[in-house]
Image (tube, grey):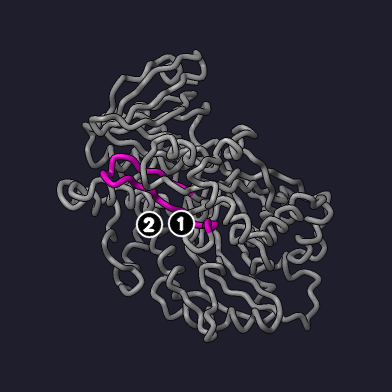
Amino acid sequence: MPQSLTSRTPKPKYDVVLIGGGIMSATLATLLHEFDPNLEIAIFERLGRFAKESTAAWNNAGTGHSAFCELNYTPEKPDGTVDITKAESIAEQFEMSKQFWAYLVTKGYVQDPKEFITSCPHMSLVFGEKDAEYLRKRHEKMADSVLFSGMKYSTDHEQLREWIPLVMSKRNQSEVMAATKMDMGTDVNFGTLTRKMGRHLLEDSNVEVFLYHEVKDVDPREDGKWEMKVKDRIHNHKQEVVADFVFIGAGGYALPLLDSSDIKESEGYGGFPVSGQWLVSHNQELVEKHHAKVYTQATVDAPPMSVPHLDLRVIDGKKALLFGPFAGFSTKFLKEGSYLDLPESVNTKNLRSLFGAWWHNLPLTKYLIQQVAMTKSQRMQHLREFIKDANEEDWELKVAGQRVQIIKKDEKDGGKLEFGTEVVVNKSGTIASLLGASPGASTAVYAMLNVLEKCFPEKLEGEWKDKLLEIVPSYGQKLAHNQELTDKVRNYTKEKLQLEY
């Protein structure tokens, strides 16, 4: 490891401190440094390198979430119509991420985009008459949107065999199936991308990066600044660091750190940790028969992050197939966390929220228990719904990342379990934290701009505005109703990121 990352001592005071070395902190640090290179910024990461937790390649599905294939973003309303509002919003957010990454490539901050983003068609696949009808209506609605024009739909087995030969092998011709396909989907290695950003920050900016440094506490000071207890885990040295602005992007550990800040906005938040597992195949004969990310419907009582999908993954230049996720449970808030994380997160402020969320999600608890108890053979049975002749010897079980789903106060139920991503900011805009999971990394740029909008509104509308529009040309405009702008943005990012759809 570089000597400079393990022997330097943090300064006692910074303008900005970012906690966590995942994609969120790397994105925010890069944005802030571009807006004002004179800002004194420090990043503290408790592990030995960036992107070792949720951002790591095998700890997430690597889907560039564009709402092309994720059916939970397009619910069917009671009147039978399909609502694509959320899908359009998420698609626009991912377009912002691609513009930011294209900017990094253009400036030479990040090299070789093919190492972190690959073209990979996104497909939705459903079984049976009822779901096929839903998918038809969904396609009809989405194809009319600027963001999803070009989406193909088919129920024809011959066409499906061409799209997904591995899935269609040994299928009964009478089986009712339907699929949609968007060729401009992507597979993203968020770990590689984050480490590329981290390398740029370390080598070509005045942002200070401290690995093996853990922030244990965030306390408010009377002068409005924040005081943090920082532990150097290599030398077992502790010191206090003060900052004007703090961002907590520490994955599952964001919750206890946010709680330590004692801001009113953090009251009532709790966390429900959920781990995951994938079935993974490196058998290249199988891999060559599947060139897409194929999502289907979640089973009854399954949480949205457990939507089954069979994906092509490209990690470090090597192709593999991934199927899952299968839910698991651990009381840890991070993969490299402590089993005491969950019990220690319970306090008088969130006890009612936690109990309310548990009581109103008993089916989810039952689902998780069933998932945890599954054997590999039982998991293979689920895979065989996708690949009829899947061989157990071709697949290995791999543990995915640890997620902490948000539990929020709810007047009616006491607490409510949320499955999205949420930014929590105090009234004065001097501290912000990112909580939650999916769509997470894919929408990091939107999420971090949301932080800046809440915490630095005058600067973003003033002296930072021109640079912001250089980084994200579509900022402040709706793509969903602007064909010309959408085409312009997509052509730009396709060229810079070397995409091949």
Residue type pointed to by label 2: Thr
Determine the residue positioned at 51% across, 72% down.
74
| Dot 2 or dot 1, earlier in sequence | 2
Whether residues under marks 2 and 1 lie with C-beta atoms below 8 angstroms apart, the answer is yes
Residue at x-position 36% and y-position 56%? 96
| Residue 136, picture quadrant | bottom right
The magenta region covers 414-435
Farthest residue to the left: give it. Answer: 462
Please say whether residue 343 is one of the residues in the magenta stretch: no
Which amino acid, mark 1? Leu
Q: Position of residue 297 (x, y in %)?
A: 64, 69
Quadrant in which residue 345 is drawn: top right
User: What residue lies at 59% left-to-right and 61% top-to-bottom?
Assistant: 304
Q: Write down the residue under mark 1.
A: 499
39 vs 389: above or below: above
Query: Can see residue 84?
Result: yes
Q: Nearer the viewer, residue 268 or 210?
A: 268
Front residue of 422/408: it is 408
- Mark 1 surroundings: few (<14), some (14-19) or many (≥20) residues within 10 A: some
Q: Is residue 307 above or below residue 131?
A: above
Q: How far is disc 2 from disc 1 in space, using C-alphas?
A: 8 Å
Vertical order, 403 against 119 (above or below)? above
Report the residue at 74% width, 46% height from top. 397
Residue picked out by circle 2: 493
Regarding residue 204, the answer to whether it shows in the image is: no
Task: Locate residue 391, reporting x and y percent.
Answer: 83, 55
